[in-house]
Each structure stands twice: as C-alpha cells, then as structure tokens.
Amino acid sequence: MTGFRPTILAFCCNWCSYAGADLAGVNRLQMPTNVNVVRVMCSASVKPEYVIKALSQGIDGVLVLGCHIGDCHYMTGNHRTAKRIPLTAKVLETVGIDSRRVKLDWVSAAEGDKFQQVITDFVEVVTGLGPNPLREVRF
Amino acid sequence: MRIAFEEMKADRLLAARTEHGNVAPVLLARGDVPGELRTDVPYQMANILLRVVPYLGSDRVAVVARKCDEKAIAEMSKRGLLDPGKVSLIGLACDARQVSECRCSDPCPSKVHIGECVKAAPADKEVEDLLAKTVPERLEFWTAQFRKCNKCFGCTSNCPVCFCDECLLEEKTFTPEKGIPPGFAFHLIRSIHLADKCVECGECERACPADIPLLALRKMVNRDVKELFGFVAGDGETTSPLLTTLDGEPMEDDHDVC
Ligand code: SF4
Ligand code: SF4
Ligand code: FES
C-alpha cells in the first residue's frame, strides 16, 4: 500500500471547527493536504445521507467536526450529530464498510492544535485501511 | 367480522377480501355487504390506513391489524399522523407459517380477536449468518444483492413507516435519475432513514421483485439501533432517540418528524 494517499472529506461546522481549522492554518501547523474541508453551518447539517453518498462515491474517509457538546450555535444541533453519525458508522460496518472510515469529533474555535491532531490521526488510520472498497465496485 | 361495528362501534372497517379472484383491501361502511373477507393472507393494513384516514373525516375506523401493523400504527400516531382515538384494532394473530416466513420475534397482537397466537420464531438464522461474516465478506454479499435492484421503489411504497412528505430517495442527488441499479447509497440511505421506525413487518422483502433479503438487512440495522440506543420501534410512547437530545429531552426545533 505504499504511496496510497486517501481522499478525505472533513465537514466542519462554521461556528467552531471551521474556525479551529482556520486557526490551525493561521498558526501554520503542518497538516496533511489530502483533506477537503467542507464548511457547513452546523454539524447537524451533515445528514447520514451525505456521509453515505461520499463513501459510496469512493471517498476514503469522512470526518465530521462540530462544536463541543453544549457549545453548538444552535443549542442542540450537535446532540443530533452525536447520535446520527455513530449510527451511520455502525450501519456501514454491518453492510461491509469499516466503521473507522467515519469519524466524529468536537473541535472548538480555539483548538487549532486539536484540529491538526484529529486530521493527522484520521489520515493515518484511513491510510492504514487502504482505498475505499466501493471505489472498485461498479454498479 | 361484524365485531367491528357492534363491539367496537366503528363507522368503517378496513379489511382484506376476495375481489375478482385476488385479495384486495376494502373499506366497508356499516350495512355494506361484506363479501368474502380474508385474514389468511398477510396484508399491510397500516399503510393503507394512513392513506385513507385523510378522507374519513370524523369517522371511527376499525382495522384488521397484525402485531406489526399495530406497531406501525403506533409509530404513526406518535408522530401525529393519525389520531389513535379514531382507530380500533382488530387483532389478528399470524399463523405458524407466516411467523416462520418473517422469522418474527413478536407475532402476538396485544388483543387477539382472530386466530390464535403462536410462539415467536427462534433467532433469525439468516441474520446470524450474515453477521458472522467478516466485514469484507459482508460487502461482497450486499453489493451482489444490491446490484439486482431495479429501482422500482416497491420497498418504499409498501413500507408502512415510510411516510415522509418529501422522499430523499426521489432526489437525484441520492438516486440517479437514469439507469439501474441505483447504487449502494440507495439502500443504505433507506436503512438509516427507517432505522428508528422499522417494525420488521417484512413487507419490503415481499415486495422486492429482485429477491433482495431486505428483511435481514432491516433486522440487522434494528439490532444496531438497539445496541446503540436501547430503542426498539413500535410502541406509542418512546420518542425515537434520533429526535431527542443526549439527555433524552425532545429537540426544541423538531418539525421534521420523519
Ligand atoms: S420491514 Fe421493511 S416494509 Fe416493514 S417497516 Fe421495516 S423497512 Fe418498512
Ligand atoms: S423493492 Fe427491491 S428492486 Fe425494488 S427498489 Fe426496493 S430493493 Fe430495489
Ligand atoms: S454549530 Fe457547531 S456543531 Fe452546531
């Protein structure tokens, strides 16, 4: 699997994680470059169907980042995320996609370093898993 | 079957009967000729009930309901789609053959009017076998299955708890407008979207012309939901965990019930 660079999609909520990602950038923290950040208004806008669609189209890993519980701009938005995303991961594993390809974490606007850490770790895990098997599946 | 009108004082009866040699649902009013009513063929009455309710006005309706219909009706009333006060259930117990076909774990309606309760089927062998597979083997199995799908939407139309106003699967973002099969996402989105409502009636599997083992898939997803949240669909009280906060409070902004 040498030279495999996974394609990663990171959904970041506008109010915390995207700001966190920004901070990481401003601080010039070194980060893997194969992560595509998608800014969403709240982690709750990341519905399971988006995660599933991304994976079924061959994205190797999906990261969902939101505010810490209690800090969501929309009060309980991330409570919803905290239930939906683990369920999505579990169901994916049930039908044969490794659940480690989906990860949920909380990153606040002040946690540039945590953002770097989460991204780096996730890329490492997904690199270890190899390419998304659905890339090869033609329907 | 006249219990509906005398005992339950209902204005209408929703049941299945023989029509031109086939079994079809009928909505009878008091005094109608009942014809040959049938209870031996599984018929998903909950689904039909939801569709006729808007035309019934203040009429009270009695409906022949198996345990799974009863649960589906509970899921509907919980979401405010119908008024449980206007619906009386005529409990129909499934026979041994039907129970074994669905590998049903909960076949006995809360009040039995027709038939006799039989024992629940033992653990579902098909599900056990699928879960015993490794993750890559599961993928191989399910891609082979999903490839057969011809996007007929039979599974959706026949599902009693598939009741959102706007169907995600009809959006081209998730289901390509042209061509079959619709791909992996179609089935997974459906699984997740029904994860907190599916009552394991098996109607999707019966409807599927491609013989995809949809009931096994539903059962596995339901098991996942149970493991994660300890929630089982089908009772009229417990709000779905996907509609509550982490502390179990209902979400303030909840307008999408589905
Ligand atoms: S078994 Fe199939 S048809 Fe029945 S409630 Fe579940 S998804 Fe719907
Ligand atoms: S009933 Fe079967 S073939 Fe039809 S859309 Fe559903 S899974 Fe596909
Ligand atoms: S706004 Fe950040 S998770 Fe809701």
Image (cartoon, coloured by chain):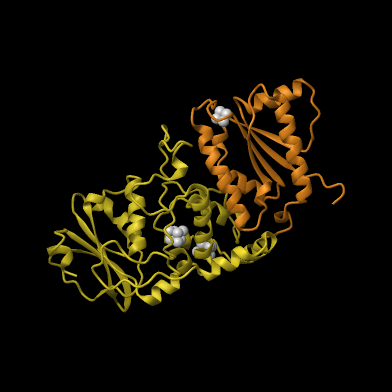
Chain colours: A orange, B yellow
Q: At 19% across and 71% down in the image, what residue appears?
A: B34
Residue A59 falls left or right of residue B78:
right
Examine the rendered structure and indicate whether residue B12 appears above or below residue B20. above
Residue A44 in which image quadrant: top right
Quarter of image, ligand 1: bottom left
Residue B110 in which image quadrant: bottom left
Examine the rendered structure and indicate whether residue B232 appears above or below residue A31. below
Q: At 58% across and 45% down in the image, what residue appears?
A: A86
Q: Can the viewer see residue B212 in this picture?
A: no
Q: Nearer the viewer, residue A45 or A67?
A: A67
Percent of width and height locating residue B239: 39, 44
Q: At 36% across and 56% down in the image, what residue appears?
A: B72
Q: Can the viewer see residue B17 in this picture?
A: yes
Residue A66 in which image quadrant: top right
Q: At 50% across and 68% down in the image, what residue appears?
A: B124
Q: From this viewpoint, which residue is outermost toward the bottom? A: B21
Percent of width and height locating residue A18: 65, 27
